[in-house]
Amino acid sequence: MRQWVLPAGATSADALRLREVPEPEPGPGEVRVRVHAVSINGRDQMVLSGPFGRIPGRELVPLSDVAGVVDATGDGVDLAVGTAVTNLHWQDAPVPEPPLGLGALDAPGVLSTHVVLPVNQVVRAPAHLGHVESATLPVAGVTAWNALFGDHPVVPGQKVASLGTGGVALYAMQLAQAAGADYLGVVRRSSSARRLHDLGAAEVVDSTGFPRWGARLRELTGGAHKVVDTVGTATIPDSLTALAWRGEVALVGLFTPEPAPLDPMLLFGSGGSLRGVAVGTAAHHRDLVAFMERHDLRPVVDSVHPFSEAPAAFAHHRRPGVTGKVVIAVP
């Protein structure tokens, strides 16, 4: 089989090397998946640049989200060959420690033509989706589902906000709209604002014109019942400011590791809460699949890149203004 590997110490996608290795055989309780698509997440860029998720001196097969077809099974597995699947990241609460999953530390990733996984780490893909779309579910889709419905579940008539136009933000938009909520976007460029309006956003705030975007969002809409913060700790003050009474900020971003000072009065003033979200459980994943099938939801895919051009896919994913998921198709 073929797989991309990041050499020890490398911190750029340009360093990725394509190699041929023996095709793996599944052992007891395992399945082999013929990979058809993998998607890139923000955490994959963090692992790439290190030291987050890296073991010094150790090479790594990157990426964590895969869609494909079971083509071999080990003893004790009743999942049929030919089943279209995606992967799970963790089974039940509490969240694993550390919650890094495949493609980090000593867990090889999925940027390969075949992967072997425990049978309890795969789940049936949505019946109405192809492999490219299904590959976006494991991190972005499940994280957005947990953010919206894992606690303080969104109900019809409420308002949901998310930051940016990445995979989690766009999933939050689609899931909120399907649940009967109004979607509010926060972006940093006018082209992204137009894109969100085209996708049905009720209101969009461009933070370049309104640096205190939380106050602006509250002024325009009365506040959001749920804010999915995809950036990180530096944006928490604005996210809390944007809350409606007894709303929740679901913090999913890790991109600003230096925390900003937090004013407790922002919580008292809204009666709100702040919750950390790290992907989700197997139950969250299965609930998401059922919801997407019921509502015929198709995730927003920004671009699809061939397996042979995986380094270019990483580079594209880093560009400003990416809308939705970046996927690598595996022939």
Image (spheres, helix red, strand yellow):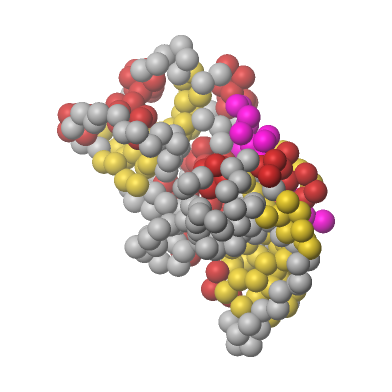
Q: Is residue 317 magenta?
A: yes
Q: Position of residue 83 (x, y in %)?
A: 70, 71
Comparing 4 with 284, the one in front is 4
Comparing 321 with 216, the one in front is 321
Q: Position of residue 16 (x, y in %)?
A: 69, 48
Q: Position of residue 91 (x, y in %)?
A: 45, 67
Q: Residue at x 64, y 37 (%)?
A: 317
Asked whether, in this view, residue 247 is left or right of residue 14, the answer is left
Which image quadrant is residue 66 in? Answer: bottom right
Q: Residue at x 57, y 74 (%)?
A: 118
154 to 31, vertically: above or below: above
Q: Position of residue 14 (x, y in %)?
A: 70, 41
Q: Is residue 294 visible?
A: no
Position of the N terminus by quadrant: bottom right
Q: How many marks do you count on the picture?
A: 0
Q: Is residue 174 magenta?
A: no
Position of the C terminus by quadrant: bottom right
Q: Residue furthest bottom?
A: 75
245 to 252, vertically: above or below: above
Comparing 321 with 201, the one in front is 321
Q: Residue furthest top?
A: 209
Which image quadrant is residue 155 in? Answer: top left
Asked whether, in this view, residue 72 is left or right of residue 124, the answer is right
Q: Residue at x 25, y 29 (%)?
A: 261
Question: Start and end of the magenta stretch?
Answer: 313-331
Q: Is residue 111 visible?
A: yes
Q: Residue at x 63, y 82 (%)?
A: 27
